[in-house]
Amino acid sequence: MRVLLVEDSERLQRSLAMGLKKEGYAVDVVGDGSEGYWYATHHAYDVIVLDLMLPGLDGMSLLRKLRGSDHEHKDAHVLVLTAKDTVEDRVNGLRAGADDYLVKPFAFEELLARVEALMRRRHHVKNPTLSVGDLHIDTTQRRVTRGGRDIELTAREFALLHFMALREGEVVSRTQIEEHLYDEHAEPMSNVIDACVYSLRKKIDISGRPSIIQTRRGMGYVLSRDRPGQAEEPQQTESAG
């Protein structure tokens, strides 16, 4: 899952980016409002974390400009960060198009919970636990089980499974996976997605039963509980976590 952090405090940039990446998010960080607007309109973000006090273009102006544009990414979910905590400030932010509002100082755990909630809202999901047949993904505890068995995943594998579970039954291309799982500084090798899928299959599949991650040649992958037939696996065994 990919997050854009628009914050001019280098201290907050480092701590928030580090925390979100540790949780498996791909994070792009910018400290200028004008640059933030460019990023917001040129990449598909699941959530934008936006400070209001920014150089170049203030956060409120960025938000109004984004919502008022005809760009395909104008409806990205936005969590506003600000030191202004009056009712009027919060109301103005929400009416400008913010989806949520967090007043500084705040605990990282609260920010993470709000990002998770916006992620669910973006994909029209209420329950923090996603289920695909007997596979259960607790997105708050980062816990995965299948048939009652706990499955240990790397942060990258969890992010991939979460991304596909939100799109259960839909074919997702390698390009879509790269866009949502890697930030702009990452340069995944051509086979890294295949390798990550292969590793994930080995952990979540049950011997003697078809894989729930199916390969669609020339198209991508689909996570589905009901599709018969054994998936075609990549030939390499490299781990991409």
Image (tube, helix red, strand yellow):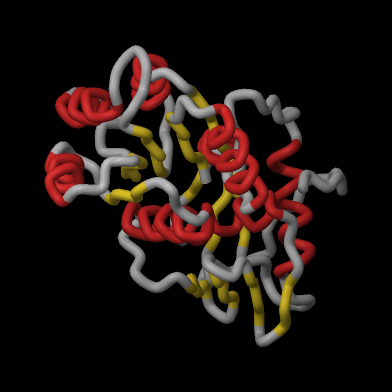
Residue 230, visible in the rendered structure: yes
Residue 24, given in percent of the width and then of the height, sits at 63, 50
State whether residue 214 appears in this view: no
Taking the image as shown, residue 113 lies to the left or right of residue 88, namely: right
In front: 150, or 131? 150
Q: Dividing the picture into quarters, in which one does residue 74 lie? A: top left
Q: Whole-percent x and y of residue 85? A: 26, 48
Query: Which residue ends up furthest to the bottom in the rendered image?
Result: 148
The image shows residue 43 at horizontal and vertical percentages of 43, 27
Q: 224 and 141: which one is in front?
A: 141
Answer above or below: position of 124 versus 56: below
Q: Residue at x 56, y 42 (%)?
A: 16
Q: Is residue 67 positioned above or below 2 on the image?
A: above
Q: Position of residue 125 (x, y in %)?
A: 35, 65
* Residue 188 occupies quadrant: top right
234, above or below 73, in the image: below
Report whether 208 appears left or right of 98: right
Locate residue 236 relative to residue 8 in the image: left or right: right
Outermost residue toward the right in this view: 237
